[in-house]
């Protein structure tokens, strides 16, 4: 029997309260594994922001917040370290959350190299002692997701030169299996999923759901319980669609952002708890899925699993 892989990831990851919440949630669910696509600004205090200069930008310029004060930086990294040591994954979301759609391979590679230097020099860059350092380094960063999912023509060559194992910047359909490109890099896709009451099918990411709901039916935000129910329902339908057909992996991406009273976070936690105890469901990191697909191929033999009922696929 082919297991159902579920991949839950987060982009940016600056907000400390979100780190606390997901650390506590992960501690409650030992089978859960999460991937955090962390922006490099998280590794610099506001005071040291000019140590970063992105392609074509002035020093200290980014489209996402820097790491705040020293105490905030230390607390955030303590959460990262604890999660990393528990088997969760820290991956790259580049540094400044800049739109690299038009970047050359050299510009992308410069951004990747800056990210690695921020990890290597974390304590020294921020005036911290070794006891406040990172539990991980550049060699532990195996994958990448592009800010804004901007995947211009220069990206693939830079990913290969940096020797990333996977890229999670793609968009596709719910039943798409990951594929390797010619450089041997796994390509993972967020999925377009139906959302009850809406014409468009947003990507399986909180920001994209929020935008569609805001534009097509802003009145939904007057009833947050209904909003939450629709998001849970959308994720469960995505799960059930894959579970009863070919067991293609699920990809759900969120942000450390308070969209409408944390409704999307609450919905995601409810979805996870509704299916995590199934013995044939595996919540894994992108690096772990890359390992498994390297071993069995994509899609693996016997992946088509028709005949399971919706009643079996989650509450």
Image (cartoon, helix red, strand yellow):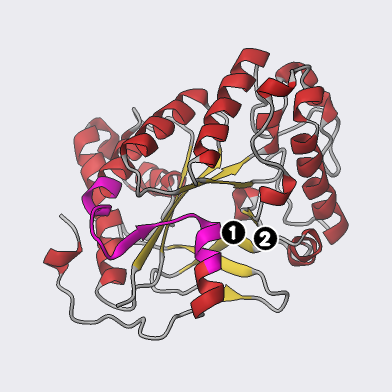
Q: At x 36% / y 60%, what residue is drawn?
A: 282
Q: Position of residue 7 (x, y in %)?
A: 43, 56
Q: Position of residue 191 (x, y in %)?
A: 43, 63
Residue lying at the far left of the rendered structure: 311
Q: Residue 285 magenta-drawn?
A: yes
Q: Position of residue 178 (x, y in %)?
A: 52, 72
Left or right relative to 173: residue 274: left
Q: At x 57% / y 33%, what residue is drawn?
A: 81
Q: Is residue 201 above or below residue 297?
A: above
In depth, the one of 169 and 161 nearer the eye is 161
In which quadrant is the C terminus drawn? bottom left
Q: Quadrant of residue 106?
A: bottom right
Q: Which mark is residue 151?
A: 2
Q: Residue 256 magenta-drawn?
A: no
Q: Quadrant of residue 182?
A: bottom right
Q: Which mark is residue 228?
A: none
Q: Secondary structure at mark 2?
A: loop
């Amino acid at each position: 029997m082919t297991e159902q892989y579920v991949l839950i990831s987060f982009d940016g990851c600056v907000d400390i309260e979100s780190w606390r919440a997901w650390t506590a949630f992960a501690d409650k669910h030992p089978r859960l594994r999460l991937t955090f696509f962390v922006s490099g600004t998280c590794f610099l205090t506001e005071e040291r922001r000019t140590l970063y200069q992105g392609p074509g930008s002035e020093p200290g310029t980014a489209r996402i917040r820097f790491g705040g004060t020293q105490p905030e930086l230390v607390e955030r990294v303590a959460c990262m370290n604890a999660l990393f040591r528990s088997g969760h994954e820290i991956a790259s979301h580049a540094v400044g959350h800049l739109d690299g759609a038009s970047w050359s391979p050299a510009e992308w590679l410069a951004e990747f190299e800056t990210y690695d230097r921020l990890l290597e020099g974390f304590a020294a860059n921020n005036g911290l002692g070794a006891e406040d350092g990172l539990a991980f380094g550049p060699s532990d960063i195996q994958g990448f997701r592009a800010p804004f999912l901007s995947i211009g023509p220069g990206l693939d060559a830079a990913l290969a030169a940096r020797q990333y194992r996977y890229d999670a910047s793609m968009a596709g359909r719910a039943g798409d299996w990951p594929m390797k490109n010619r450089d041997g890099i796994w390509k993972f896709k967020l999925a377009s999923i139906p959302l009850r009451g809406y014409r468009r099918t947003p990507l399986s990411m909180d920001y994209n759901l929020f935008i569609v709901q805001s534009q097509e039916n802003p009145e939904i935000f007057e009833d947050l319980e209904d909003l939450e129910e629709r998001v849970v329902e959308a994720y469960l339908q995505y799960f059930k669609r894959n579970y009863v057909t070919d067991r293609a992996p699920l990809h759900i991406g969120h942000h450390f952002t308070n969209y409408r009273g944390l409704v999307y976070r609450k919905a995601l936690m409810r979805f996870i708890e509704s299916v995590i105890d199934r013995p044939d469901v595996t919540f894994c990191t992108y690096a772990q899925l890359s390992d498994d697909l390297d071993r069995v191929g994509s899609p693996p033999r016997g992946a088509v699993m028709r005949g399971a009922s919706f009643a079996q696929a989650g509450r």
